[in-house]
Structure formats: C-alpha cells, structure tokens
Image (cartoon, coloured by chain):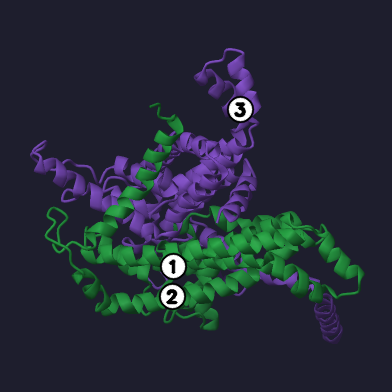
Chain colours: A purple, B green
C-alpha cells in the first residue's frame, strides 16, 4: 500500500518536473515570488487578525491547538474586529483618512486639470520638457519633498519668519501639525499622478470639436463642462484613483505634517504595531483597510488606468 | 500685451512644484542653523554630512539594497512581462496579471506589516531570512518594485511590431535566440528605465524598510525620517541637494539615452 503511494508520488513529481521546462519555468518564477511574498503574507495577516494578543514572543496566540490526541481546537477571536467598530478612535481614524484622501484628490483634480490642459496646448517641443519636469520631482526623494514643506510651514519655518519679520503677525501661525498641512503634503506629493492620466486624455481630444462649440456660440465654461469633461472621464477617473488609493493608506505625510490629532489609518497601524505592540489589532486594521476600501476601489476599474499611466510615463522619460 | 491663461497656469503650477525644493537647496548653503537668518554662504553642512558616520553607513546600505533589489526585480519583471504579452491565453492568466499588478495598490504599512509577519514565521521554520543583514529589505523591495517594472516593460512589449519576431522564428531561429537577438535590444530602453525606477523606489522607501529592517540594516530614508521628526536641520538640506542633483542628472541622462534608443528602435519596428 505504502509502496503504491510512493510510486504515485514519484510519478507525479516526475511529470511535474518534465512539464516545467522552458515556457512553464518562465511562468513559475514570477508567480512563485508573488505567491510567497505577496499573497501568502496577506493570509498570515488575516490569521493574526483573528488571534488574541498575549504577552509572549511573538505576541499573539495560535489559532489551531491540539488539545489532546484527537481534539483539534480552532479559536477565532473576533474581538479585534469588534473593537475597531466600537472604539471611537479607530472609527475616527477611518473617517479622517477618507476625508483627507477625498479632499486631496479633489484638490489635485482642480489644480491638475488646468495644468494638463495647458501642457497639451503648448508646442510639441515645449510639451516634452514640461512633461519631464512633471516627472522629475517624482524621482527626487519623497521624504525630501515632505521636508520642504516642514521647512516652509513649521513655527520656525520660512513663511512664519517672513511674516514676523515684516510684523504682519506677532506669534507664529499654526501652519503645520493639522490636517490641512497633511492634505497639502499629499497634494504636493501625488499631483504628478493626477496630471499624467489627465494629460493623456486631454491630448486625445480633437480640437476641432471645441472650435465648433465656440463657433456655435458656446461659452468657455459651458464648453469645458459639456465637451472637455465628458471626453476626459477615463483620465479623471484614473487620476483620482491613482491619488486616492495611496493617499488613504499614507503614513509618512500625516505623521510628519499632520500633528498628533491627525490619526489616519496608516498611522494607527504603525502605532498599534510599534508602540502598543498589539499585532492582532494592527493586522485587523490592515485587513479592514484592504477589504473595505482598497479592494472595492480597485475592483471598480481593474487597474487598467495604472497601465495607462505607466505607458505614458515611459513615453515621457 | 495679452497674457495667455495657459502660461499663467503653467507658471504657478511649476512654481508650486519647484519652489519648495529650490528653497531647500538654497538653505543648504546657509551658514546659520536657523532659516530665520541668512548669515552667509557656507559649505559647512556638506562637510558635517560627509563626516557623519551614521549617514554614510546608511547610504551604503541603501545603495546596496537598491542595486540588488532593482536587478532581481528587473529580471523577474522582464519574465513576467513576456508571460503577459507573448503567451497565448492560458488558464489563470487573468489571475496572474491581477496578482502581479496588485502590489501597486497595496498600502505601504500593510505591505510592510505582512512581510514582517512572513519573515518572522519563516525565520522560525527555516532560520532564514534573519533579522540581521539586509536580506529582508531586499526581498521586500523586490516585491514592492516588481509590479512597476513589469508594467513598464509590458507596455513596451505590447507596442512593438511582432512581425520582426515572427520573421525570425519563420527563418528558423529558436525562441531563445529570437529573444536575445531581436526582442531584448528593442525593449532594452524600457528595461533600463525599469531598473532605474526600481532603484529609485527602493532608495526612497521608508515605511516598508522600517517594518522589516533589522538593527544592522538601517537604510538612508530611515535615518532621514527619524531626524525629520525633530524638525528642520541644515544637514538634511545638504543631503537633499546632493540627492536631487544626482537623481536629476540620472533622469536626464536616461531620458536622452532612451529617446535616442527609441528613435532607432522605431526605425526598425
């Protein structure tokens, strides 16, 4: 019996190795990587989110336990999730994150749309330089871009110094350490993500349609809203997602510019893990962030727009 | 004189993007520690930076991690891009594309946390990768950058004319030879760009590295981040100026390079 089983197993392995040649090997390498280092860790996170926090190393309990020879006990602790919904701090964290991400996305759209239009209307030579200048800050360090705003906004920073020097104010204005500063930082950091898909969409518009609208007596605002906006909807959608999704889980910007009261989900995960050493809570927060916000947003458009952006990034640089 | 609205928009838009960075560079030359006073031109913050052993060690770690992870990520990404564009439909192709691109939308804190949990579990069973050394950061950064690289190379593979490859196959070249003689030279600019993007992303990451890096593998962004918590420091200005110079020169060189390569590649395809 055992002999037969081994024979089958060896045969199976043999077939497997024979089949994994050439093309299959190509498929297997990246698949294995993503499976092991991306998908599997998500399940570990799910597992830990259902464990109990204990004082040990690692600080969570095992879900599966052999009580005696024949009894397998599975203990699922739903308390972590229940706490997220009952404790006001976590709920407020989700609301703060959503508001900051939505407000930043809207501001990026308002700032990015005129810029995309202006870039699309410039001559071809200038346009390539302008597009490269949009990408360039993206390549300079993210932390440095946040630091630039600390230097400008902090109580001993440039803006407050200039205002005090000319005696416009007596005490430094509280420009930093509030949610507006966090919004500003996110807009500054993610504006290129908005401009690229918008530019892509605007560029494709046939200018004669707009001229026809003007000839027929349409006003600029009306032309914009009834012709330009409908024709660029895919770009608006793509840009909004590219700003909104990273903004919702953002940690660095709210941490450095948002001050103590701007507790976003990203910061809550960080604090639970590093300061409270509550791994199950951090894991439950992560799972909730993924299932409640990131998955629904992504499922609504299937990443097509990101490819759209990457394609253009390459043309520009 | 009538000013065109688009020029006004461009002026303020680019002012918003570049003025803060420009000011950071200017104040790296300030003699005083405070931005309130300009007490003269000085290179002393650059000297302080160069003689700071913590920053030097972290820079070396970061460069090492970034070059190793960018290289592996580019190889894996090229393979994945070929699978996506050149394989006939196979079962699970949609799942494959979805899984490859999913890390693009993963919040950094979640990715860092989940990878650390995996590494802790792996260390328990296989005693690898340990918390010492930078293996964990390298693996994490490959996972982070793989999807970007794949998307970039895949876009180039989709663009170019496949009849070149088909002609070579018809004339009896093996698929491997076709790849190295025809495909690789044409997509080479995209591969270089992919490597540079992966390198920059790895050099820039602070959140994931903070989660997974052990005591011996502090990267440059981690050092910068911890000093930013204490507010303004002219040494960071000097570091920013150096980083910006190096990176912009790199981007401009790679843009010129890929522009030239692309125009010759377009002549063929």
Instruction: Give the numbered dot on residue A215.
Output: none
Instruction: Give the alpha-carbon distance from disc 3 to disc 1, as whole Å.
Output: 39 Å
Q: Chain of mark 2?
A: B
Query: Would you name the residue on which mark 3 appears?
Result: A230
Q: Earlier in the sequence, mark 2 or mark 1?
A: 2
Q: Residue at x 42, y 43 (%)?
A: A85
Q: Secondary structure at mark 1?
A: helix
The one nearer the camera, A146 or B210, is A146
Q: Chain of mark 1?
A: B
Q: Secondary structure at mark 3?
A: helix
Q: Residue at x 50, y 42 (%)?
A: A195
Mark 2 neighbour density, 10 Å: few (under 14) some (14–19) many (20 or more):
some
Query: Would you name the residue on which mark 1 appears?
Result: B203
* Visible residue check, residue B59: yes
**Residue B232's spot in the image, x, y percent?**
21, 58
Give the answer, above or below, for where A274 lies relative to A203: below
The one nearer the camera, B169 or A272, is B169
Query: Would you name the residue on which mark 2 appears?
Result: B63
Instruction: Give the alpha-carbon distance from disc 2 to disc 1, as whole Å.
Output: 7 Å
Q: Residue at x 46, y 51 (%)?
A: A133
Q: Chain of mark 3?
A: A
């Amino acid at each position: 019996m055992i002999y037969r089983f081994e024979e089958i197993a060896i045969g199976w392995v043999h077939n497997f190795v024979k089949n994994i040649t050439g093309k299959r090997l190509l498929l297997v390498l990246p698949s294995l990587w993503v499976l092991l280092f991306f998908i599997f860790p998500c399940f570990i996170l799910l597992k830990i989110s259902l464990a109990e926090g204990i004082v040990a190393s690692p600080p969570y309990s095992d879900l599966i336990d052999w009580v005696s020879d024949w009894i397998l006990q599975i203990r699922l602790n739903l308390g972590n999730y229940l706490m997220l919904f009952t404790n006001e701090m976590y709920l407020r964290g989700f609301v703060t994150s959503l508001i900051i991400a939505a407000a930043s996305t809207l501001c990026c759209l308002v700032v990015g749309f005129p810029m995309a239009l202006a870039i699309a209307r410039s001559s071809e030579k200038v346009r390539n330089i302008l597009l490269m200048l949009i990408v360039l800050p993206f390549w300079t360090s993210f932390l440095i871009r946040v630091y630039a705003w600390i230097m400008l906004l902090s109580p001993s920073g440039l803006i407050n110094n200039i205002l005090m020097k000319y005696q416009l104010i007596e005490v430094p204005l509280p420009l930093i350490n509030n949610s507006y500063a966090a919004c500003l930082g996110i807009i500054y950091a993610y504006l290129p993500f908005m401009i690229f898909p918008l530019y892509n969409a605007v560029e494709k518009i046939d200018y004669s349609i707009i001229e026809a609208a003007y000839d027929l007596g349409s006003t600029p605002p009306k032309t914009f809203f009834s012709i330009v906006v409908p024709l660029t909807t895919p770009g608006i959608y793509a840009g909004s997602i590219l700003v909104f999704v990273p903004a919702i889980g953002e940690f660095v910007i709210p941490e450095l510019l948002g001050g103590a009261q701007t507790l976003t989900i990203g910061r809550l995960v960080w604090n639970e893990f590093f300061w409270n050493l509550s791994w199950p809570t951090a894991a439950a927060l992560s799972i909730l962030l993924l299932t409640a916000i990131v998955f629904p947003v992504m499922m609504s458009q299937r990443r097509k727009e990101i490819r759209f952006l990457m394609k253009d990034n390459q043309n520009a640089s | 004189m009538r000013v065109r609205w688009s020029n006004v928009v461009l002026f303020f838009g680019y002012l918003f993007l570049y003025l803060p960075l420009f000011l950071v560079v200017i104040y790296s030359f300030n003699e005083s520690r405070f931005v309130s006073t300009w007490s003269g031109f000085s290179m002393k913050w650059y000297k302080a930076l160069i003689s700071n052993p913590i920053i030097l060690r972290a820079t070396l770690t970061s460069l090492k991690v970034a070059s190793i992870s960018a290289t592996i990520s580019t190889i894996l990404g090229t393979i994945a891009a070929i699978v996506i564009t050149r394989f006939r439909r196979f079962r699970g192709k949609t799942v494959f594309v979805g899984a490859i691109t999913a890390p693009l939308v993963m919040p950094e804190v979640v990715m860092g946390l989940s990878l650390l949990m995996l590494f802790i579990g792996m260390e328990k069973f296989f005693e690898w990768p340990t918390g010492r050394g930078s293996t964990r950061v390298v693996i994490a950064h490959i996972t982070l950058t793989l999807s970007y690289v794949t998307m970039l190379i895949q876009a180039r593979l989709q663009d170019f004319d496949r009849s070149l490859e088909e002609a070579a196959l018809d004339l009896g070249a093996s698929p491997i030879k076709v790849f190295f003689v025809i495909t690789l030279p044409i997509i080479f600019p995209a591969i270089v760009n992919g490597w540079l993007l992966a390198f920059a992303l790895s050099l820039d990451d602070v959140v994931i590295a903070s989660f997974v890096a052990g005591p011996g593998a502090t990267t440059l962004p981690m050092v910068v981040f911890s000093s930013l918590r204490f507010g303004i420091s002219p040494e960071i200005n000097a570091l920013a100026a150096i980083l910006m110079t190096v990176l912009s020169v790199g981007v401009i060189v790679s843009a010129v390079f890929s522009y030239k390569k692309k125009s010759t590649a377009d002549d063929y395809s």
